[in-house]
Amino acid sequence: MGNPDSDFNFKFKFNKDYYLELDKTTLSDYRGTSLFKDFKNTGLTLGFIKNNTYLISKINDLFWQVTIELPPNGYIFDYLDENGNVLGQTSPVESNNIDLDGENLKYEGTLDTTLTFNGVNLSFEEKIIASVDGGRKYKLFIRKSTEKEKIFFSSFVDSTMIQFENNEITTRLSDWYPFNVNYSNTTNQYKYAVLNQTQQIIIVQEKKEEVRIDPCGLCRPITKTKNVENLKLRYARKVGLNFRAAGRIKESC
């Protein structure tokens, strides 16, 4: 597990005996959000900050507080086959009773979502932390699993629990959140993905050409057209001719 003050992280599995389902209201508000069953091959990465109990996860490029709750009255669960496919729906929840073909799938006893690891207290209980999750709750409702669902959840890969490096979560992902890919925890050290490829910048200094004014003091670095017109004008002024008649003048410098 490494040093719990700096690199706390470990693998774990959710209990296959309990079915967890993303609240359908959340799913309708955030269409396309991955369901809990979609983490079969990747696992769910949960993170916490030292001295805080709530759990955060990055799902579909959004940050969520992950919670586990008993279902409210009227909620209708899906139920799955051994491959995770939806077979149908249960009867609406009534006082936590969940009927499926005469079998009651309600969670027995009092739901305790508190976790303790080496003195670190964590909880799936909802907390108000809008500055972190934007008010988004990845709310999972719980019930007992069917026999086919137990087979499916047994095939889940391990999930990961990590401690965030900083005590304060900022809005810049690169500051604190280890990416879901391209890092390993075999040495209990985070490896962050490269956000930007940097290149060495070489400054090329161009040599400036020195513009020299003709020693006679009459010529200037101007265009030929303007130079010709200026010569005509000077000649016209000297000899008292009009400007057009001075066109016979030839450049001498």
Image (tube, rainbow, N blue to C red):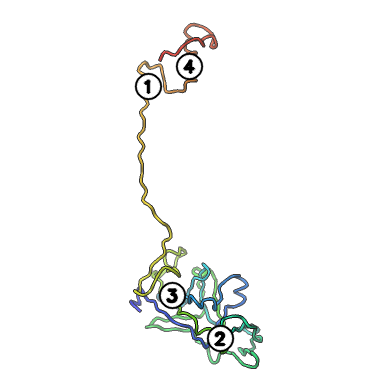
Residue 217 spot, x, y in % from top left: 38, 17
Give how far apart the Cα atoms at labels 3 and 2 are.
Answer: 29 Å
Please name the residue shown 49% across and 13% down the image.
232
Q: Quadrant of the C terminus?
A: top left
Callout 1: 10 Å neighbours few (<14), some, many (20+)?
A: few
Q: Is residue 163 left or right of residue 97?
A: left
Q: Which residue is mark 2?
A: 149
Give how far apart the Cα atoms at labels 3 and 4 are.
Answer: 80 Å
Q: Are marks 1 and 4 in contact (CB under 8 Å)?
A: no
Which sits earlier in the primary sequence, circle 4 or circle 2? 2
Q: Which residue is mark 1?
A: 213
Which sits earlier in the primary sequence, circle 1 or circle 2? 2
Callout 3: 10 Å neighbours few (<14), some, many (20+)?
A: many
The furthest residue to the bottom: 102
Q: Which residue is mark 4?
A: 230
Q: Are marks 3 and 4 in contact (CB under 8 Å)?
A: no
**What type is the residue that disc 2 sits on?**
Glu
The furthest residue to the front: 83
Q: Which residue is mark 3?
A: 48
SS of the residue under disc 3: strand
* Nearest to viewer (mark 1 / mark 3): 1
SS of the residue under disc 4: helix
Which sits earlier in the primary sequence, circle 3 or circle 4? 3
205 in relation to 42, above or below:
above
> Quarter of the image holding residue 86?
bottom right
